[in-house]
Amino acid sequence: MPKKLTKYMAFAIIVFISFLSPLVYGQDFGRPLIKHFTSKDFRLNSAIWCIEQDERGLMYFASDYGVLEYDGSSWRLIKLDNNSSIRALCKADDGRIYVAGSSDFGYLAPDSIGQMAYYSLLDYMPEGSEKFGEVWDVVSASDGVYFKTQDKVFHWDRTEITTINSVNAYRLYIVEDVVYARDDGTGLLKISGDSTVLIRDGEKFSEMGVWDMLPFNGQILVTTAEDGLFLHDGQKFSRFKSAADTFLIDGLLYNTCRLSNGKLAFATRRNGVAILDEDGKGAQFLNEENGLTGNVVFDVFQDSDDGLWLGTQDGITRVELNSPFTMLPQEKIANSVITVLHRFKDKLFAGMVLGT
């Protein structure tokens, strides 16, 4: 090969390396694709407290003004008779979505023209039980639907409503078709019929608030806002240490959901979202640093297409967790023009125009 040509090739290689050298990115550099919906989209200035999806694929969101319905292109507000705020939604096994409102609770069903409408269950309330204030949570089991006020549980067996008194907390939990509640000063209870039973070692949570209970590798995972995660093996509770402990405790954990791949997604009120591996040893975080509009997240929900929906204090976000595409953040590439990308040994090399 002529020496002159060899010199040109060497020069070209040096220039190519100089193109690539400024940017070297690790395997997880890209952000997931994220879509934000704000008050400009659904015309409400409201926090989003809870998320559900019906059998047709339509999405429903609990807001301060009613239930928001989204069909993929347009938004519609479904109001309660008393125009109250909505704190929780729950889809039952029959596909019906139940609604927990303020001084009211009921369900969504098609009206005479096929549009989803709200139907109250107040007419089925026992006499003398009509005034109960905010309904904070709702869960569905094979024996009916349970609604939680601050100090009561209402059990709708699809025929009548019975009342369980003196259960002082705001949440309900369901694991393997068993409904649980927490009574402040007593601990974690199992609801059996229309009575309650303290579960083994349940007194551990007599003074400690519980946000969620989920099945976890043959045990029950219990989440708390400020004290981390616990596991119940049927006999006692033990701490479950994870790679996200500091993030969850400092962030004030709020709601949790299990993803289709077995991982768990946690919403926090300060730090955004943590996605925890099944063994607890690996974690991914979603917050303002990688694309969210804010770190206050009240709910996490995975739809039938594996998209992760987030209910936040100022809108709704959908994250494409399982997409093969990710986004390179603008702040990492500044105003540079990238001319070539190449992945080598789990690193992404980017070549830029010289002088930018």
Image (spheres, rainbow, N blue to C red):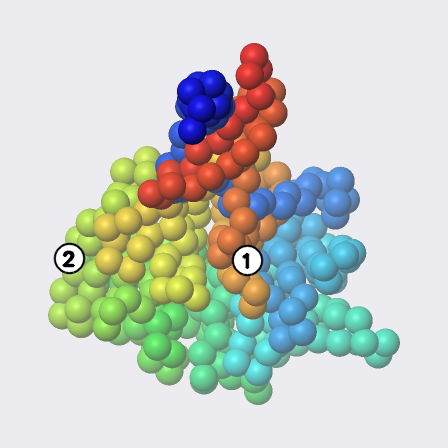
Is residue 36 visible in the rendered image? The answer is yes
* Amino acid on which the number 1 mark rests in the picture: Gly
Packing grade of label 2 (10 A; few <14, some 14-19, many >=20) is: few
Residue at position x 64%, y 43% in the image: 36
Q: Secondary structure at mark 1?
A: loop
Residue 18 in percent (x, y) is at 45, 20
* Nearest to the observer: residue 348 or residue 73: 348
Res. 322 mark: none
Earlier-in-chain disc, 2 versus 1: 2
Can residue 11 be seen in the rendering of this structure? no
**Structural crowding at the residue carrying mark 1, measured as other residues with C-alpha within 10 Å and reported as few (<14), some (14–19) or many (≥20):** some
In the foreground, 4 or 72: 4
Q: Which of these two is toward me, 57 or 169? A: 57
| Local SS, label 2 | strand
- Residue at position x 40%, y 64% from top? 261
Amino acid identity at mark 2: Ser
In the image, farthest residue toward the right: 113
Alpha carbon separation for disc pair 2 and 1: 32 Å
Say which mark, if any, is on residue 238. 2
**Residue 13 higher or lower than 324, as above or below:** above
Instruction: Say which of 63 and 13 sits in front.
Output: 13
Furthest residue to the top?
Answer: 355
The residue sitting at 43% across, 41% down in the picture is: 343
Q: Is residue 29 above or below residue 351?
A: below
Indicate the position of residue 303 as horizontal and vertical percent values: 55, 63
Instruction: Give how far across and how far down residue 142 sits, in percent.
Output: 45, 84
**Rendering coords of residue 316 (x, y %):** 61, 47
Q: Is residue 94 left or right of residue 141?
A: right
Residue 117 position by quadrant? bottom right
The image quadrant where one finds the C terminus is top right
Q: Residue at x 52, y 80 (%)?
A: 93
Residue labelled with disc 1: 307
